[in-house]
Amino acid sequence: MQKSMKLLKKQALTALRISAPSLRACSVLVLENSGKLDYRGVSKRMNNISLKNKMIFSYGALIIFAVLSAGIFSYTNVEKYIYNQATVSYGQTLDQVEMNIEDKLSTYYELMNQIANNKEIVLALSHDYKSPADFSYEFLNTISQAYEIKEIDTTNNILDIFIFKNNDSLPEAGGKLLNVQHAVDTWWYKQYFAKTDQFSVNDYIQFSKLKIWFVTDEDIKPKYSAVNEDSVLETRIAIVKPMILNFEKIVGILEMYIRYETVFGEYMSSDPNNGDHFFVADERDEVIFNSFESSPGTNQKLDQAYLDKMEGKESGNFIVAKNDTKNLVFFKKGKSSNWIYFREMPLENLLSSANTVKRFTIFIVVISIVISILIAISIGSRLSRRISILSSNMEQVDDLSLDMHVAIDGRDEIGKLAKNYNRMIRKIRELIEQLTASQIIQKEAEMKALQAQINPHFLYNTLATINWMVLEDEKEKIISMVDNLSIFYRLSLNKGREYLTIGEEVQQIQAYMNIQKIRMEEKIEVIYDIEHDILDAYTPKLILQPFVENSILHGAKTKKSTTTITIRGYRQEHRIILEVQDDGIGLKEVPLPGQYMTKGGYGIRNVHEKIQLRYGNDFGVEMTSTPDQGTLVRIVIPAEVMPPPNT
């Protein structure tokens, strides 16, 4: 009865299902009108989202936007502040390094100036000597003063001093006073001294200020007659300065070698692990010092990218990419040496403290977003709770549940909508109960009328057959027919119950077929293929008999040869399938389930409707037929192991 009620409710609630979405739309419209909102521009997808989710999304999006904006703004400013502070700090460190080195170089340059500007030494280098005695006197009393600076250097940082003379009357002496021809192949001579014979007085004035600083590890012994072997292979810093007489001509070139470690000391060391290091390039763009290198060298050229970034600038910083890593480079040009001082480090190391702030900011933002979403959910739930209650009850109507009552307080539009909805559901429930009762009574009357029609007709035919057999004195057949007839009617009556076990239904069909086989003189052959595990399941009675009778009418009575009728029964998941198949003449046109009302026989139609009325639209009768080959009927019912109540 419960499933019958469901089927009738489903038919009666069609109009209610159609109206339910309208009710939901109406409830949303009530909120929109109460808040005077205009959703005309909202897309169809947004219209399919629940009101609660829309509110949560709206509030959440606003809060997340505000939190993200504040977090991004805060982090950006903190990162910018840290970057600016770090660049100032690292830049000041580089300035200090540059100042320390330039101060040291200036000290040695002043010593060079004392020699290069010594008029006595300059005149001695330009004098035209007639005899070795004249030279010896001048060398011992004048020129030798240039070499005394090394002797009085207590730090032992001045490695050597050379004078390249431009006076053929002045002989070389002591490996320290050398002919200028020994220097003509050097880069600095070619660059600065090769064209000095074309200088004017002003050119000489400017040239007198020249100072050339560089680093060298060349073996000078082949160029200069005799030098200390220890200084030949040692990397050292060199300074070259012209010695000019009265701004008219160059009488000599002064060169001083300084110990490399004196200038580039331990304070310029670096940590290879973090990538922070110093390096220095000379005016030839050669790297003369790199704190990453274990030993000094001058083989590496400065990258062109650095030169492009520095073009026209005395100091500053820029970013270069190396091995998929961005490095920040600080640079400053020396005022005295024309060297360029660099400090380079990975940008991520510079912003390591900013990364800490970034992680903390992300943590705060994530926590804030989570809290914001929870707040948005709480607000959205509170504001949409009554609409959700009403919508949930409407969805239960789709599940054929009409026993719900919407408990929504309030006199606003939502409260009025809920009261009207409750009133409508109550009226529909009353109408469905009335309709269900009347339809059940009608179907039961139809089934009883069918039985009343079948049973007398079958009984009449059977009794007529028995009468004929009495005349023929066929006692055994008479006994068999009487036994089968009693079994058939006993199970048909079934004490007024409408349901049998499948085993009893099969037993009834066996009795029916035994009678028919006697009546039709064995023109029928019956095969039973019933699984034993379904025999105890329950089924409405007389669901096989109309189809077996149909097989006889369209098979055995119209076919000259023997007709085989196969009756099968098996379980398929939670369903039981009963099949009646014959090899008769078949049907020219097989009605679909929806056409049983108009094209099916009365018995077929009632069996199909009876099953669907009881179990729903997922069950019922299916027919397939091929002309001259036979017909197959499939009856699908649920696997019920207990008899239905009140049956």
Image (cartoon, rainbow, N blue to C red):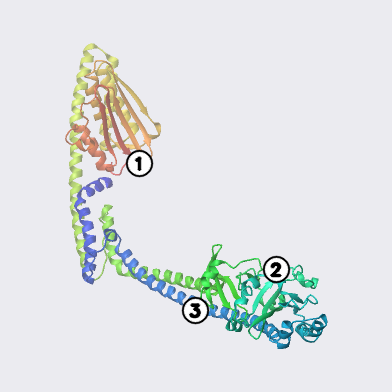
Image x and y of residue 514, in percent: 29, 22
Q: Percent position (x, y) of residue 230? A: 79, 72
Q: Label 2 belongs to which residue?
A: 294
Name the amino acid, label 1.
Answer: Met
Q: Is residue 490 above or below residue 406?
A: above
The mark closer to the camera, 3 or 1, is 3
Q: Give the spatial CA distance, label 2 vs label 3.
A: 36 Å
Which label sits on residue 81?
3
Disc 2 is placed on an element classified as: loop
Q: Quadrant of residue 461?
A: top left
439 to 237, vertically: above or below: above
10 Å crowding of disc 1: few (<14), some (14-19), many (20+): few
Residue 270: give x, y in percent of width and height. Answer: 65, 73
Asked if one can make out residue 542 in the rendered structure from this viewpoint, the answer is no
User: Closest to the observer: 190 or 486?
Assistant: 190
Q: Is residue 588 visible?
A: yes
The reply to whether discs 3 and 1 touch (Cβ–Cβ < 8 Å) is no
Which one is nearer the viewer's eye here, 328 or 160? 160
Disc 1 marks which residue? 642
